[in-house]
Image: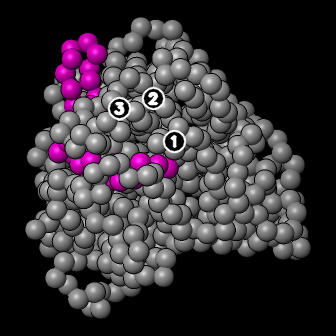
């Protein structure tokens, strides 16, 4: 029996995280009581994070001392792993992604299937698009329209969601809202249009906690007719960041009837870059590389840096920032994309790292760690031509500034819609409920890793209900009724409840439209970019300005896969207008 599709079925310390919406991050620690609010978020770097070097991609699960009587506890769901009853030896090995260049009018055959994949020295049954993990990199020109004939050959029903694209609603890939789920053995024809340049991705919208986690994801790179950014570069790299959870020699099973790991989401203990445990890149001295970054993990927020090499942030989910800026790291939440340019000025090796600070909830202690994702090896050979002068310049992008300038007046405008993000947890074993109550004494604005793994594993969407609550009406999740017209400009306030039973950060994604992050905690954003996913740390208040351009029924949801599976989603309607 395949897992149930719940999307269709349910239509004292303080961690001060200066996590600006531009992607840089700074972490400091100050004494504080639980009642105190977080400081507002601002721009910063990562230079003050104490780190412990690590040379491995396999991270041990951080296991707190087991609570009394908890050892024998099990989740309220049965276990699921893909390929039940299938001889793994009959399955093809997954290969690396291939680049597919499509012109307007072209058709791509895209197939989801079972594959074998080697991770951490073991071979597992996983999923793949066209037998590739990640799936094919689709490259098109802005304004193109292409056709995708999708075939489902996995052991679950599924769809394909084209994340971030302002495409026709009937092809958005949401079962029960825009299409019926594609059953095993069936096909569905998508027509995809690309009105905006940038980096996008595609993934299922059925049990993402399983299907996406096991390899069903791929990127789309949309080119304009000109150089997409102000700086010419020597080379470009499309990079996906992911993780996977392994215990011993086996994948940790998923919940069949409902998702597990529902409180914090499923953190993996093996980090992956482009589907592999180690990222390797060769470069020349002085080479400038443009990295298109996508976080495809279920719940992990990465904090990425390149061994001290100067890094310039130039783009976000849907296009460029108004102003380029130098950053020391990029904090990238699930589903977000950022574009950075990195100059490797000297020969040698540059470590690609994930630098994080976590909170041990049992002990009430912070810890720091560095996960090594890979290395960039820079030879003595000089890159030509010399791009140093253009790289060091910080450009103001007048085209973007002119486009967003009319929307700045909405910073002080009244809020049109407001959502409170919170949670209802019930019916977990008493030991777990008591631990969670104690755990909430310490509030991490962003959970960078799982430090309560046993309790998190025990929680399923039978006991955990993540909530979007309309502050004006009290309606929650799929009962919320928002209606707009094309041409509307809607100011939406998102508030992440710090007093929830277990507060958690949330990357909030809107389908089919684009928005600006106007302000965080009352502080106006001075460097705007069009986005489709915004990260809300615990206790944060974020004002979005939604530009309504695309008619249809659209989703708004948390992009932590287990939170979505636990109900944290709503739909809003857009009428064509007059």
**Callout 1 environment at 10 Å: few (<14), some (14 to 19), or many (20+)?**
few
Residue to which mark 1 is pinned: 363
Q: Residue at x 23, y 48 (%)?
A: 460
Q: Nearer the viewer, residue 320 or 33?
A: 33
Q: Nearer the viewer, residue 290 or 21?
A: 21
**Residue 264 spot, x, y in % from top left:** 38, 45
**Residue 358 spot, x, y in % from top left:** 56, 44
Left or right: residue 549 compared with residue 207: right
Residue to which mark 3 is pinned: 437
For the residues labelled 3 and 2, the Cα–Cα distance comes to 8 Å
- Asked if the stretch drawn in magenta spans residue 401, the answer is no
Residue to which mark 2 is pinned: 441
Region of the chain picked out in magenta, as a range: 449-477
Residue at the front extreme of this rendering: 68
Please tell me which of labels 1 and 2 falls first in the chain.
1
Mark 1: secondary structure: loop
């Amino acid at each position: 029996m395949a897992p149930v599709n719940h999307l269709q079925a349910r239509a004292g310390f303080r961690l001060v995280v200066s996590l600006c919406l531009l992607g840089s991050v700074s972490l400091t620690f100050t004494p504080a009581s639980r009642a105190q609010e977080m400081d507002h978020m601002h721009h910063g770097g990562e230079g003050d994070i104490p780190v412990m070097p690590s040379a491995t991609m396999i991270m041990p699960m951080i296991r707190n001392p087991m609570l009394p009587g908890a050892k024998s506890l099990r989740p309220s769901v049965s276990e699921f792993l893909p390929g039940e009853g299938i001889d793994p030896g009959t399955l093809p090995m997954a290969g690396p992604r291939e680049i597919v260049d499509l012109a307007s009018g072209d058709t791509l055959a895209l197939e989801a299937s079972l594959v074998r994949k080697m991770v951490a020295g073991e071979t597992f049954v996983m999923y793949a698009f066209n037998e590739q993990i990640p799936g094919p990199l689709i490259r098109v020109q802005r304004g193109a329209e292409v056709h995708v004939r999708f075939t489902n050959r996995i052991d679950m029903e599924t769809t394909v969601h084209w994340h971030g694209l302002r495409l026709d609603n009937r092809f958005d890939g949401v079962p029960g809202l825009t299409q019926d789920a594609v059953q095993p053995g069936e096909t569905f024809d998508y027509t995809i249009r690309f009105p905006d340049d940038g980096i996008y991705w595609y993934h299922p919208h059925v049990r993402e906690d399983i299907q996406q986690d096991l390899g069903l994801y791929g990127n789309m790179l949309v080119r304009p007719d000109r150089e997409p950014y102000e700086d010419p570069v020597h080379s470009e790299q499309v990079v996906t960041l992911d993780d996977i959870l392994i215990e011993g020699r086996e994948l940790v099973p998923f919940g069949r009837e409902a998702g597990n790991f529902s409180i914090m989401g499923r953190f993996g203990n093996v980090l992956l870059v482009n589907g592999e445990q180690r990222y390797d890149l060769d470069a020349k001295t002085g080479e400038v590389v443009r990295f298109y970054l996508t976080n495809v993990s279920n719940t992990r927020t990465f904090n990425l840096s390149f061994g001290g090499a100067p890094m310039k942030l130039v783009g976000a989910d849907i296009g460029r920032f108004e102003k380029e800026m130098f950053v020391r790291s990029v904090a990238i939440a699930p589903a977000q994309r950022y574009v950075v340019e990195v100059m490797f000025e000297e020969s040698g090796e540059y470590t690609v790292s994930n630098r994080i600070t976590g909170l041990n909830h049992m002990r009430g202690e912070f810890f720091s760690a560095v996960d090594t994702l890979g290395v960039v090896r820079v030879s003595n050979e000089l890159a030509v031509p010399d791009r140093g002068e253009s790289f060091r310049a910080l450009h103001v992008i007048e085209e973007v500034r002119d486009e967003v300038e009319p929307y700045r007046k909405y910073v002080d405008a009244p809020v049109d819609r407001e959502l409170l993000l919170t949670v209802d947890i019930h019916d977990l074993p008493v030991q777990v409920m008591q631990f969670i109550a104690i755990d909430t004494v310490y509030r991490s604005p962003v959970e960078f890793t799982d430090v309560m793994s046993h309790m998190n594993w025990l929680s399923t969407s039978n006991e955990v209900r993540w909530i979007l609550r309309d502050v004006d009406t009290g309606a929650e999740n799929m009962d919320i009724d928002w209606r707009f017209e094309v041409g509307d400009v809607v100011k939406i306030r998102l508030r992440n409840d710090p007093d929830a039973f277990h507060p958690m950060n949330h990357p909030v994604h809107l389908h089919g439209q684009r928005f600006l992050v106007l302000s965080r905690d009352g502080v106006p954003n001075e460097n705007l970019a069009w986005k489709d996913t915004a990260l809300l740390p615990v206790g944060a208040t974020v004002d979005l300005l939604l530009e309504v351009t695309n008619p249809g029924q659209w989703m708004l949801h948390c992009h932590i896969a287990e939170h979505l599976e636990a109900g944290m989603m709503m739909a809003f309607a857009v009428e064509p207008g007059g």
